[in-house]
């Protein structure tokens, strides 16, 4: 489903500002459909209103749910897919040499942010005014976009007792991930929680499952060891917390597109250049 999609070109006045509203739309992606993975030279937000989508950034996967907003700064590689049954969202792009600074100034960080209910009326104003080429229409688009962006905050509201759980769970994962025996079940036991409860709280608070977070910690350690040491791959697997070299190689290939050995060779070649 595509309800509307608009694109415009900047007026000279907008170019002088250093940023302008490039395009926007309202879209629904249904699996297995997905957008092409590629980098863009503009800033873009995705405001989830129904269903959910999986966004990938820096080797990590995040689940975007209703009320949350994903932000890709200029130069990012856009990589996202819908989850069953569908992913419905509003999107808005801001272009220009100062576009990234505009988002930085509003403390909107790359990745998941919280927005609450989507300001549909503001998106509608931009939809109506964006095709027009008058100065008044362009300024109305910028004003509405500014209102949209100022409604975005870094983290979703979390009850104080859940914030303590989130902080403790993340600190525990950061400390224990290198132990191959450490898993979600063990984390839940150490925190005195049911595994399902811990998983729900962690996913809601951080936008990523706790099992994925542990795996990502291990992958990041492995990448550092492969790039910065001559430690044999089998020992890299153990030091990073993987249960076996074979499992490590499979997970590494799934997340990076190359085996640990090939990744190390490429890293060494880059260092020699």
Image (cartoon, grey):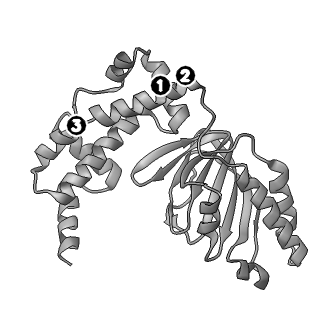
Q: Closer to the observer: label 3 or label 1?
A: 1
Residue at 84% x, 70% y is 139
Residue at 17% x, 64% y is 265
Residue at 76% x, 60% y is 145
Residue linked to disc 1: 165
How far is disc 3 from disc 1 in space, using C-alphas?
23 Å
Residue 27 or residue 55, whichever sits in front: 55
Residue 93 or residue 262, whichever sits in front: 93
Given the current orientation, which residue lies at the most extreme bottom position?
Answer: 12
Residue 161: mark in rendering? 2
Q: Closer to the observer: label 3 or label 2?
A: 2
Q: Mark 3, residues whose alpha carbon is within 10 Å: few (<14), some, or many (≥20)?
A: many
Look at the picture and state if 111 lies above or below 242. below
Look at the picture and state if 193 lies above or below 64. above
Disc on the earlier residue, 3 or 2: 2
Is 264 left or right of 21, judged from the image as shown? left
How far is disc 3 from disc 2 in space, using C-alphas?
30 Å
Residue linked to disc 3: 241
Look at the picture and state if 135 lies above or below 229. below
> Is there a contact, CB below 8 Å, between mark 1 and mark 2?
yes
Is 168 left or right of 20, judged from the image as shown? left
Disc on the earlier residue, 3 or 1: 1
How far is disc 1 from disc 2 in space, using C-alphas?
7 Å
Percent x, y of residue 268: 17, 67
Helix or strand or loop: what does disc 2 sit on? helix
Helix or strand or loop: what does disc 3 sit on? loop
Q: Mark 1, residues whose alpha carbon is within 10 Å: few (<14), some, or many (≥20)?
A: some
Helix or strand or loop: what does disc 1 sit on? helix
């Amino acid at each position: 489903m595509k309800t509307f999609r608009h694109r415009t070109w900047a007026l000279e006045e907008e170019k002088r500002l250093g940023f302008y509203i490039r395009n926007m739309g309202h879209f629904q992606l249904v699996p297995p459909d997905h957008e092409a993975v590629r980098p863009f030279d503009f800033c873009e937000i995705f405001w989830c209103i129904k269903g959910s989508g999986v966004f990938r950034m820096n080797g990590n996967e995040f689940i975007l749910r209703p009320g949350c907003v994903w932000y890709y700064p200029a130069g990012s590689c856009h990589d996202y897919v819908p989850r069953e049954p569908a992913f419905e969202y509003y999107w808005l792009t801001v272009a220009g040499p100062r576009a990234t600074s505009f988002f930085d100034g509003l403390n909107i960080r790359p990745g998941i942010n919280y927005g609450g209910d989507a300001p549909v009326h503001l998106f509608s104003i931009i939809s109506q005014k964006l095709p027009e080429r008058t100065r008044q229409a362009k300024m109305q688009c910028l004003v509405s976009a500014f209102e949209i962006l100022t409604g975005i905050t870094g983290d979703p509201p979390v009850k104080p007792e859940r914030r303590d759980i989130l902080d403790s769970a993340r600190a525990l994962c950061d400390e224990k991930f290198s132990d191959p025996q450490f898993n979600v079940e063990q984390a839940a036991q150490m925190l005195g929680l049911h595994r399902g409860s811990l998983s729900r709280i962690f996913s809601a608070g951080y936008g990523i499952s706790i099992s994925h977070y542990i795996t990502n910690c291990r992958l990041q350690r492995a990448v550092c060891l492969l790039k910065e040491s001559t430690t044999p791959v089998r020992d890299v697997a153990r030091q990073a917390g993987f249960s076996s070299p074979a499992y490590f190689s499979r997970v590494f290939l799934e997340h990076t597109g190359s085996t640990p050995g090939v990744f190390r060779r490429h890293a060494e070649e880059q260092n020699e250049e």
